[in-house]
Image (cartoon, helix red, strand yellow):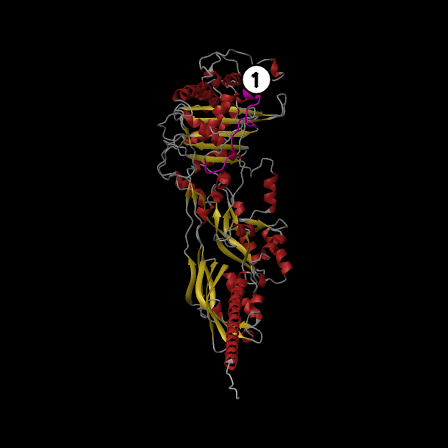
Amino acid sequence: MRRSRRNDGKPLFRLMLILGIVAAGLSAVFAFMIFFKLPKYVKLEELLVQYMNNIEQKKYEDMYGVLSKESTTKISKEDYIARNSKIYEGIEAHNMKVNVKDTVNNKDNTITVQYSTSFDTVAGKISFENKASFLKQDKGYGLIWNDNIIFPDLGENDKVKVSMEKAQRGEVVDRNGTVLAGKGAASSVGIVPGKLTDKSDSLNKIAELLGMEKETIEKKLNEKWVKEDSFVPIKTIPKESELTLKTAENNAETQDEIQDKLLSIPGVMISDVDRREYPLKEAAAHLVGYVQSVTAEDLEKHAGEGYSSDSVIGKSGMEGLYEKDLKGQDGIKISIANEFGNEKKVLASIEKEDGKNIKLTIDSSLQLSLYEQFKDDKSASVAMDPYTGEVLALVSTPAYDNNDFIMGISQEKWKALNEDEKKPLYNRFRQKWAPGSSFKSIIAEIGLGTGAINPNEDYGYEGLSWQKDKSWGDYHVTTLHKYSPVNLENALIYSDNIYFAKAALKIGAENLKKSLDKLGFNEQLPFEITMEKSQYSNTDKIETEIQLADSGYGQGQMLINPLHLASLYTSFNNEGNVIKPYLLYKQDAKADIWIPNAFSSDVTNEVMNGLKKVVNDPHGTGYGAYRDDISLFGKTGTAEIKTSQDDKNGTELGWFAVSTSDKNAQKPILIVSMVEDVKDRGGSAYVVNKDKIVLDKYLRWQMKILYFHEQTFLEYIYFNKNVKNTTIWVIL
């Protein structure tokens, strides 16, 4: 029997199996190709990002290493680095950001990466869309470089220019528009390093002519930003033709002669420059402050704030306090220019904005007057309008000429200023001092306000030395005058330490502490300039009876800032309200009350009756300031600074606080002056006599000047440099 052959489908199955395997294999291969081809795009993207990031890190050699072989034959490494570094560093490119948008695989073995980029520059942010092409190499890809990778519109022969228009620094002026800090002229001596011949010998000659150390010049030439063709400012010198400079041989030479010798040295250049000028010089140095050329530290600290290597920056006083307002904004433009210098495109720009002028409440003539009286003393003076709070003068003596710092103060002068025992750099009106008897008026207000003092009570005469009891040991409170009755008014007139020591004990430590806290002790005075905080103790409380008694006449551990004391004295002019002092001028001056109802009007009137007699009574300690035309009130003070009660070598601080008392006075004024070392010079009377001269000049408001106004005369002083600290008073 013949059997038929059965088809069980195995061949078909095998075929299908084979086809399936092949299809799966092809799919895997395709997937493999896709999977491993994409990373090539990713790697190129990463390569581009890394290339751009290297710009900020100044890794130009690494950037050059990314270029294709064809590109490296067209531009050398040296030329590439020079081109890129000059552009990117010239515009101060930083904070680089790159966003890859697409990649295109071209038929010519190149891949094009489309991207957007942005970065910050000295003229603001620059952003643009661009593309970069990579050529396939034996190993990987190389960047096809051309100039438009830097900027899309940049051609091979184009240049990137940074143009700057300097902003005018704002002026500091007084209430009448008189310049306290403004524009002056000078000569800038600089060096172009690449033009120096016989460098060491040239630098020695330059240093000798300018009165500088050779090392100082070398340091300036070695700063990071300096290139061979850079103009490096070395020193700013006065422009006045009559000024002389001295060589190391102490031979005096004219400015012209010095400049001729400097210009004979290859590489030296001299150009006219604007410079800051301070017409009042020493008279307002501590108030106005000064500017100096920025340092490397300044540039690092103020990165991104528009400073450059030739900028100045305020270092102290108003110049430092209002630096942001005064500085302004330099105009800066980054542009592409063709080979003929014609502008093709502006990439970024910042408009020039001149600095703002700062107008102060200061009265220059009063500032000068106070300085002239106390310039040979170690002193601090404050003047203000007691009704508005306008600060009319802030003077610290001795002082320094702030113009010296602008042109670069010599090491010799800097050393002399620092080693001067009178400390001319020390700003005394910012410090706190023992007020002595000038504080008795405030103690009187506190005593009456708390009910501890009856103004009519006679404390009785205790002699010139007193102590509460034997528990005080050898310690006694002393006074200078015998008088009767021993009441508040007479105690103010004769400045009786014993009376006010007893008054402090009656007030009590806790009540005195609370009262002084209310009056701004141990807190920051609300004022534009930071002042030392006043204190009544080295701790947070008044520790002993003796300390309490001493506090009653402004000694012990009592310390107060002169402006704070002046502010407290405004309570007498304003029915017990303490007026806030201020320095920025307001067109319509109005009082801003700092401490409302610090005392009642009855209290202040009672005390002021005594303070008027301090000045107007022949027995008063302030009688030296008496005037028969204008009513004044005030209080003197002498604070002893010594290690013990028996110390005979201690020194004394002399004080005088004085104010007009008539609210309708044409020129109301309150002055507080403090002078160190008045022992054996008349004590507080020394200060009274000085302030009297100041008041005499200031209060002659009736004066009519027919041919020129006071402002005109101040301008005359400004423009005529031979006039030195001169004041003319024309009385008609």
In the rendered image, the quadrant that contains the C terminus is: top left
Front position in the image: 4 or 42: 4
* Quarter of the rendering containing residue 413: top right
The amino acid pointed to by label 1 is Thr
Viewer can see residue 256: yes
Picture layout, residue 509 above or below residue 56:
above
Q: Position of residue 611 (x, y in %)?
A: 44, 21
Picture layout, residue 719 above or below residue 595:
below
Query: For the residue carrying disc 1, how many other residues have a C-alpha within 10 Å: few (<14), some (14-19), or many (20+)?
Result: some
Q: Is residue 185 left or right of residue 642?
A: left
Picture layout, residue 27 above or below residue 54:
below
**Magenta extent:** 527-549
Q: Position of residue 2 (x, y in %)?
A: 52, 88
Residue 532 is covered by the magenta coloring: yes
Front position in the image: 115 or 105: 105
Q: Is residue 71 left or right of residue 695?
A: right
Callout 1: helix, strand or loop? strand
Q: Which residue is mark 1?
A: 478
